[in-house]
């Protein structure tokens, strides 16, 4: 294990708050400690970022792109170490952690390649009006525990690409891969451009309130997002909020469900279901519910559960004890409602936070497992009678991150726009891409990430109105 430190002003810095034990979800035991920052250290990190910003804001686009290319190369050089850390602290199987590191590199390169155009709004004799985009200043980033490395990259890289400096606070459940990422980045970037602080909610709250932070990008639960909105009012911080989801998928009547079962399972149970844009409610015509349940249960039965570093493992534990307790509670509630547990429905009899992949039938909207985001390895399969009813049930949610329609492509594509969400997939789900804007509608978020639209969220428009 390397020496984990905070990074402040380009230096490795010991945490001044009490260290946080980091638990391996496959054993339930702490395997190391993370340094933790005080609010005074957060202030130092914001000061260091502000100093770095004073120079970085004047850097050229070519310099920023080149810096991010250096970062991508440095991540690649440390790929094996980062993947190993992701497995240990987050719990996912190694192949998925390697995919996460690969995604981190791809998103870094995509941010490096983006160009921010100057828009000429008016051009005539004696008059020229241009719209420029300036960086905002210090960007605060707060990340969750499900894809810790990838989401850190999603926040940091566009912020730097647009000319800002960053202070990032990872989840205290999964701080290590972010601490290493920032150390690695600091080795190839100007001092203070990216800083890390680890802490519980109070450090996040101090970031939301901080007058020196111009913008906050947050990925996490809707409830925390609401708290951030309230606290950010002091300096009217710019906010990008990627919040909870409860994505519905509709399988059109008559679809060959054997052909799509693998896709349904993979996108519902991606990262053990702990993915914001995973498929979380599956609506199937009443005539096909039993068949779909059996097909999904057969795929669940093939999963090899175990620690992410064990060979052959395809399915890891839930990341943390509170999340496991929540999954258990929702399945318990479903049982009490008379639901049919098609497969799974229990913890494994072994140490760690393992929960068998679970399919639940016999529920509809109104049950907690359907109405609330489970964020774990359990999927409710819900019967509908007509497609209009399915759309109404899918849309009857305060969330609106993603959704999908599965079936004959023209019919599915025609239905897709009726879903109330930020992304609709046809014959797919949960695919996020570096060049495509991604964000939630309703209470799933504010703003978008990725692509030029995502990059512009890290900028302030400035209109240049030239006469003469
Ligand atoms: P969480 O909201 O509990 O924590 C996220 C981060 O916020 C952590 O770093 C935490 O320490 C910090 N935090 C907690 N309370 C805070 C406060 N009051 N002020 C500021 N910061 C605070 O979320 P989680 O349990 O880590 O993540 C799971 C949730 O994240 C799920 O709801 C999931 O859907 C969502 N998520 C959304 C996306 C997306 O892109 N929309 C992606 C991943 C996860």
Image: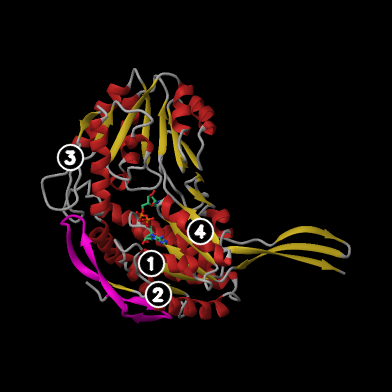
| 4 vs 3, front mark | 4
Give me the C-alpha separation between circle 3 and circle 1.
34 Å
Residue 310 placement (x, y as % from top left): 16, 54
Q: In this view, does 304 lie to the left or right of 223?
A: left
Which residue is labeled 2 in the image? Answer: 39
User: What's the residue at 24%, 34% (across, down)?
Assistant: 299
User: Is residue 363 something one can see in this rendering?
Assistant: yes
Residue 428 placement (x, y as % from top left): 41, 37
Number of numbered callouts drawn: 4
Relative to 109, does residue 318 appear above or below in the rendering? above
Q: Do the residues labelled 1 and 2 touch (CB within 8 Å)?
A: yes
Quarter containing the N terminus: bottom left
Looking at the image, is mark 2 or mark 3 earlier in the sequence?
Answer: 2
Which residue is labeled 1 in the image? Answer: 202
| 2 vs 3, front mark | 2
Q: Is residue 140 magenta?
A: no
User: Is residue 187 something one can see in this rendering?
Assistant: no
Tell me the chief SS of the magenta region.
Answer: strand
At numbered mark 1, what does the secondary structure look like: helix, strand or loop? Answer: helix
């Amino acid at each position: 294990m390397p020496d984990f430190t905070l990074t402040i002003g380009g230096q490795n810095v010991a945490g001044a708050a009490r260290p946080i034990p980091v638990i391996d979800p496959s054993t339930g035991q702490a395997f190391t400690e993370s340094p933790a920052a005080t609010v005074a250290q957060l202030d130092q990190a914001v000061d260091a970022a502000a100093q770095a910003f004073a120079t970085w804001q004047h850097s050229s686009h070519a310099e920023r792109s080149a810096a991010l290319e250096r970062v991508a190369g440095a991540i690649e050089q440390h790929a094996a170490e980062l993947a190993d850390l992701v497995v240990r602290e987050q719990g996912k199987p190694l192949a998925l952690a390697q995919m996460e590191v690969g995604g981190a590199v791809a998103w870094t390169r995509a941010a490096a390649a983006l160009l921010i155009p100057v828009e000429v709004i008016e051009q005539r004799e004696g008059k020229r009006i241009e719209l420029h985009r300036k960086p905002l200043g210090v960007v605060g980033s707060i990340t969750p525990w499900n894809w810790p490395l990838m989401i850190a990259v999603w926040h940091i890289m566009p912020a730097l690409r647009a000319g800002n400096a960053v202070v990032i606070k990872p989840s205290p459940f999964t701080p290590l891969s972010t601490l290493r990422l920032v150390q690695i980045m600091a080795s190839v970037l100007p001092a203070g451009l990216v800083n890390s602080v680890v802490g519980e909610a109070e450090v996040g709250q101090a970031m939301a309130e901080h007058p020196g932070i111009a913008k906050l990008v947050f990925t996490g639960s809707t409830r925390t997002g609401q708290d951030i909105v309230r606290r950010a009012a002091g300096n009217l911080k710019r906010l990008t909020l990627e919040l909870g989801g409860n994505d519905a998928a509709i399988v059109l009547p008559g679809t060959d469900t054997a052909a799509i079962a693998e896709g349904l399972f993979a996108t519902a149970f991606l990262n053990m279901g702990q993915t914001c844009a995973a498929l979380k409610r599956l609506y199937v015509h009443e005539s096909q519910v039993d068949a779909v349940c059996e097909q999904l249960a057969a795929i669940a039965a093939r999963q090899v559960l175990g620690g992410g570093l064990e060979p052959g493992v395809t399915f890891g534990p839930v990341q943390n004890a509170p999340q496991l307790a929540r999954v258990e509670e929702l399945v318990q509630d479903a049982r009490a409602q008379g639901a049919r547990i098609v497969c799974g429905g229990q913890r494994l009899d072994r140490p760690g936070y393992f929960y068998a992949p679970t399919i639940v039938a016999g529920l509809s909207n109104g049950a907690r497992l359907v109405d609330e985001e489970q964020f774990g390895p359990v999927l409710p399969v819900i019967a509908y009678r007509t497609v209009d009813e399915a759309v109404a049930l899918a849309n009857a949610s305060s969330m609106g991150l993603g959704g999908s329609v599965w079936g004959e492509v023209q019919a599915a594509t025609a239905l897709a726009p009726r879903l109330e969400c930020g992304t609709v997939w046809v014959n797919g789900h949960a695919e996020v891409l570096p060049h495509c804007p991604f964000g939630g509608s309703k209470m799933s978020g504010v703003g978008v990430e990725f692509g030029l639209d995502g990059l512009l969220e890290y900028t302030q428009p400035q209109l240049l109105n030239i006469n003469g």
